[in-house]
Image: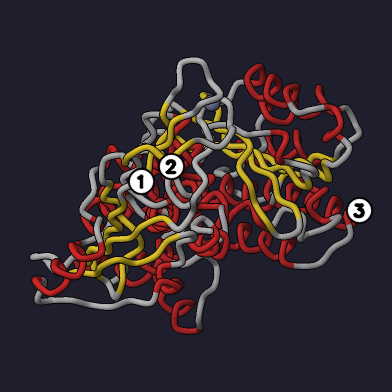
Amino acid sequence: MHKKEILFKMEKSSQNLSIPVELLGLANIEIIEVKMGRDDEIFIKVKSTKDEIPCRQCGKPTKVHGKGRTLKIRHLPILGKKTFIEITPMRGICDQCDDRPSTTQTLSWYEHNARHTKAYEQYILLSIKNSTITDASIKEEISEGTIQNILNKYIDDEVDWNTIKKLGILGIDEISLKKGYRDFITIITSRIAGKNQILAVLKGRDKVTVKAFFNSIPEKLHKTIIAICCDMYDGYVNAASEVFDDKVAIIVDRFHVAKLYRKALVSLRQQELSRLRKALSKEEYESLKTAIAILVKKQEKYTKHDKKELEKLFAYSPALKAAYRLARQLTSIYNTKHRKKTADKKLTQWIESVHNSDVRCFDGFIETLKKYQDYVINYFVDRNTSGFVEGLNNKFKVAKRRCYGISNLKNFFQRIFLDLTPYYILKRNQFVMAK
Ligand SMILES: [Zn+2]
């Protein structure tokens, strides 16, 4: 645009603004004009200060020859306002290539025909981390499809082994696709130096599938595996031991153990409560409401008042009382810093005391516990090793709900990858991408 034309335009615009170019954080530009749009958007007309237009075919410098079409590129919001950069890129013609191709100049902060700056795309990634695409789409007023495209552009849908130098602790976890259904997916993560990363989202939880994944881990990374944490489940345990032999310790984390014995407790509770509902008068059953709520909501951390309330319920159900006492004993074994050998003995004693009691709800759990006891006690070797498992499991469940179930495993991988990317990296990228 001609200088005179620009001046004329600036005079005509009533809402003429000025913004220091440094504030935009975009390299190789000069601001020509800043305007407010009708809907309070900010339009910033800029031009490139870079002379070179390397040929898109041979990479050699071209001769300037006209201009490309004007691009309106969304950039990071300024003071909460939608912000667009307008640029009319220069074009060049190559004398070196036979067909004399023309090339439109791009700058480092946007791609050919881009609708968003790279910084803005990072900002979108940041806004969907731990959130939903639908939400971000509404807030930013861009389509869900556009957001998905941005996600696809920056986040791989499977692990890139070249980016991984060490694995650390591997965690294998399962989540059900739908509540109460038997369809599972297996999620494999690794944790090193406090950082978690996603390695795979696998369909089902068969040994074959998990084993195939383990076998896909490049050989040189094998020795960087510190331990493998998993559920008390043959598919996982056998896959791990068949691929890694005794070279890697397999740990059944306390979280996975707790999940099982609490499940047994819950089914006994439901059984007992439905028995009591029939056996007791309405008033009697009503008087137990507080106690029931405590059992449902709290996990073994009872106040004095809680205990008093619980006694009312336990008076009607000695079975529940005994089962809860046994569960507390098991939790307390976990809460004590036993050595591996002592833990082994304590677990065996606990199993004994369940056998000697009238409590039968743990029988199935105990069968599993005995089968995997060697792996269960590995937890006591270094209690911190597998402590992240529960936190991650909760994160996956939340992600699943947020993504409205999991229809596409590759997509789910991307979302978990993003969720596990630290905020500071995404924040920093917004400003690095413009340079
Ligand atoms: Zn060329």
> Residue drawn 80% across and 52% down?
349
Crowd class of label 3 (few under 14; some 14 to 19; many from 20; radius 10 Å): few
> Residue drawn 66% across and 16% down?
208
Q: How far apart, in angstroms, are the residues tagged by discs 2 and 3?
A: 69 Å
Between 360 and 347, the one nearer to me in the picture: 347
Image position, residue 339 (x, y; %): 89, 60
Image position, residue 399 (x, y; %): 42, 48
Mark 3: amino acid: Lys
Mark 1: amino acid: Pro
The picture quadrant where one finds residue 362 is: top right
State left or right for residue 124 relative to residue 7.
Answer: right
The answer to whether the residue labelled 2 contacts the one labelled 1, judged by CB atoms less than 8 Å apart, is yes
Q: Which residue is mark 2?
A: 105
| Disc 3 secondary structure class | helix
**Number of numbered callouts drawn:** 3
Mark 2: amino acid: Gln
Between 123 and 62, the one nearer to me in the picture: 62
